[in-house]
Amino acid sequence: MARRSWIDKQRLRPVQNIELTARDGQKLRGYLTLPADEKKPYPLVVLPHGGPFGIRDYRDFNGEVQLLAHNGYAVLQVNFRGSGGYGTAFEKAGHRQWGQAMQDDLTDATQWLVEQGYADKNRMCIFGASYGGYAALMGVIREPDLYRCAIGYAGVYDLNMMYEEGGLRYYSDGVTYLERTLGEDSPELKAYSPVHQVDKIKVPLFIAHGGEDRVVPDEHAKALRDALKDANKEFEWLHYRREVHGFANQEHLQAFYSKVLAFLDEHIGES
């Protein structure tokens, strides 16, 4: 079977493998997709995947990646520690490392691309959904001078709230899974929760969420919105009351990605 037959394959950008060493010696792998022009260095979008555990990026067709590359952005996908496909030890290395070693992997890969001459250090943004949304916000919290903007889509923004709200609570071993992979130290979880660290954010944000998200309830986004308002931080907001974990309505998706491109063009596009 085939779908999206309307896509012109000649316009798709090739995806190349990358490999680098993180600051602690951990080998990291991922993918880099470059736009059609040859004007290096490129504006860069770092695109951390969701999950995060056992999930990974592949070299397969990814409509989001192609959309960004087609509009002039280099796209970095990193299979940070915790990702699947690289063995049990690599996946377990991400346990209880939300906002810590997993975040450092994204930072190290971003800086490596700058060093390799692919990424313009003054035009980089981080954009992700679900766990990727969390990583996007923590990226500009942990590294306030590295990125020029961040986009959180259906993201997790309060780690303690994961024990109170969200889909994992409905699984028989959901709480046990959270204890194993997230940790139980409430003060530490608070310290690595974007909603409690907004004072460190120095760049514009775009936050999008669905009101019927049962995986990451929109209480996360609303708590972040309120914290950002209280701190007088700059952000854009998109909330669809009847949407789920990742927008399903095609009109909503089109509106969302149009806003994503406009946001990127404003903050890291051609000056």
Image (spheres, grey):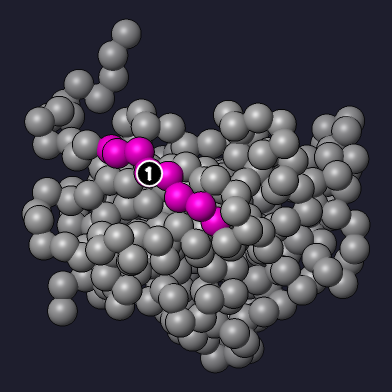
The segment highlighted magenta reads 15-22
Q: Quadrant of the C terminus?
A: bottom left
* Amino acid type shown at disc 1: Ile
Per the picture, the main secondary structure of the magenta-coloured stretch is strand
Using residue 13 as the reference point, say whether residue 145 is left or right of it. Answer: right
In this rendered view, identify the residue nearer to me: 151 or 55: 55
What's the residue at 47%, 37% (across, down)?
57
Using residue 267 as the reference point, say whether residue 54 is left or right of it. Answer: right
In this rendered view, identify the residue nearer to me: 89 or 155: 89
In this rendered view, identify the residue nearer to me: 271 or 158: 271
Where is residue 17, by image quadrant? top left
Residue occupying the far top of the picture: 1
Q: Position of residue 89 (x, y in %)?
A: 72, 36
Q: Decide: is 136 above or below 203.
A: above
Is any atom of residue 67 visible in this view? yes
Q: Position of residue 157 (x, y in %)?
A: 66, 64
- Residue 17 in magenta? yes
What's the residue at 22%, 49% (across, down)?
34
The residue tagged 1 is 18
What's the residue at 62%, 46% (across, down)?
81
Is any atom of residue 258 visible in this view? no
Q: Position of residue 142 (x, y in %)?
A: 59, 74
- Residue 88 in magenta? no
What's the residue at 90%, 57% (across, down)?
184
Q: Decide: is 93 above or below 267.
A: above
Q: Position of residue 40 (x, y in %)?
A: 16, 62
